[in-house]
Image: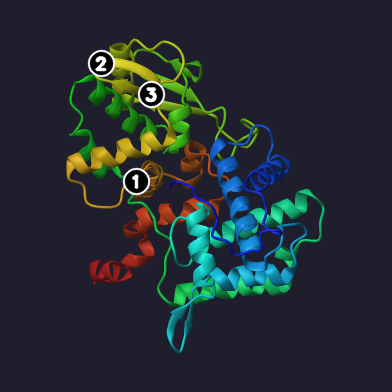
Amino acid sequence: MKRSKLIAVAPPDQALVPDRLAAEAFEAVRDILAEAASANTTRSYATALRYWAAWFSARYSRPFVLPMPEAAVVQFIVDHVQRRTRQGIAHDLPATIDAALVASGAKNALGPLKLSTIVHRIAVLSRVHGAKRLANPCEQPGVRHLLSRARRASVKRGERPAKKTAITRAELEALLTSCDDSLEGLRDRALLLFGFASGGRRRSEIALADMASLSRVGSNAFIFRLEHSKTQQAGPTSESAPDKPILDIAAEALDAWLTASAISEGAIFRRLWKNRIGDALSPAAVGAIVQRRARLAGAKGDFGGHSLRSGFVTEAGRQGVPLPSVMAMTDHRSVATVVGYFQSGSALLNHAASLLSLEKKEA
């Protein structure tokens, strides 16, 4: 979205200079994040802090300063969270300020923010206060209780987080049928199989995959060493299993792509211009490839880069793979995060659901 000047809401003598706001936001980000933090994390934190600055200056006609008053955080929640009233679903952000935020580029569209976005932006503000050792309004009981109630109300209204359709084995096989023997087809086939078979890699991990981390084992296998990931930004730990095996058809597809592209160093998956090989794919390009192959295959659903990751876990659940083995491949640190997909895949295998069938057999 092309940025334009913020609609004059605050008095000119109190309005902040956009360049100074951006500098302050990035300074705060540097205080929060380690040097090795992912680019996506850095971007999301900078975006959140810019929005806080824009919203606060427009709402209160004064500069965005820390520490933030607890009342302002409560107002932020009320401004952006939808709630049911006698007149219908509403939120409190004034229309003039909403339009100003959109016009400035701080906000993509008019209307309330998603609850997940609100939670993330409050979490970022909380980390800023923590990093600067300031009194943290986000940890106050009133704020925490209000957010908890907002989540509960959202669930009661039937709102659910949007999730990409999982690419399980059936969907993966369908997508692969759209890949021909052209250079692009070989790349996309290798990318899909690599992303799935190496443990449901995130799109950023696929984009960053490098030949230096890839080792051939025998004639039909590779080991990919995952040096950095979203949950392992400081590199592998004693609790992680960085070596990810790539076997069978996934190894064959990867070998075919590397042979055809003559790639021996640098990024594994590259941009293509006709038959010319370019630089590394971006995470967004990885997601776009998954979406394009789903369209070409006629697959039904909302597919994206995360579909390979959720699909790997779901398929593992269906096939009865033990959860620790799945987590060793995915590098999930939280059982709670992975178990939802895992249980979804193994739901029909739950013996407790077959009690009536067991009684019938015994009879």
Other-residue count near label 1 (Cα within 10 Å), few / some / many at <14 / 14–19 / ≥20: many
Q: Residue furthest bottom?
A: 86
Q: Earlier in the sequence, mark 3 or mark 2?
A: 3
| Residue at x-position 62% and y-position 48% | 18
Disc 3 target residue: 269
Q: State the CA–CA distance, disc 1 to disc 2.
A: 35 Å
Instruction: Measuring from the top left, give residue 48's x and y in whole percent.
Output: 59, 52
What secondary structure is marked by label 2?
A: loop
Please name the amino acid that badge 2 sits on. Answer: Asn
| Residue at x-position 78% and y-position 59% | 67
Instruction: Measuring from the top left, give residue 143's x and y in whole percent.
Output: 68, 71
Please name the amino acid that badge 1 sits on. Answer: Glu
Q: Nearer the viewer, residue 40 or 218?
A: 40
| Residue 186 falls left or right of residue 278 | left
**Mark on residue 315?**
1
| Residue 3 falls left or right of residue 294 | right
**Mark on residue 275?**
2
Q: Nearer the viewer, mark 1 or mark 2?
A: 2
Other-residue count near label 3 (Cα within 10 Å), few / some / many at <14 / 14–19 / ≥20: many
| 277 up-or-down from 30: above or below | above
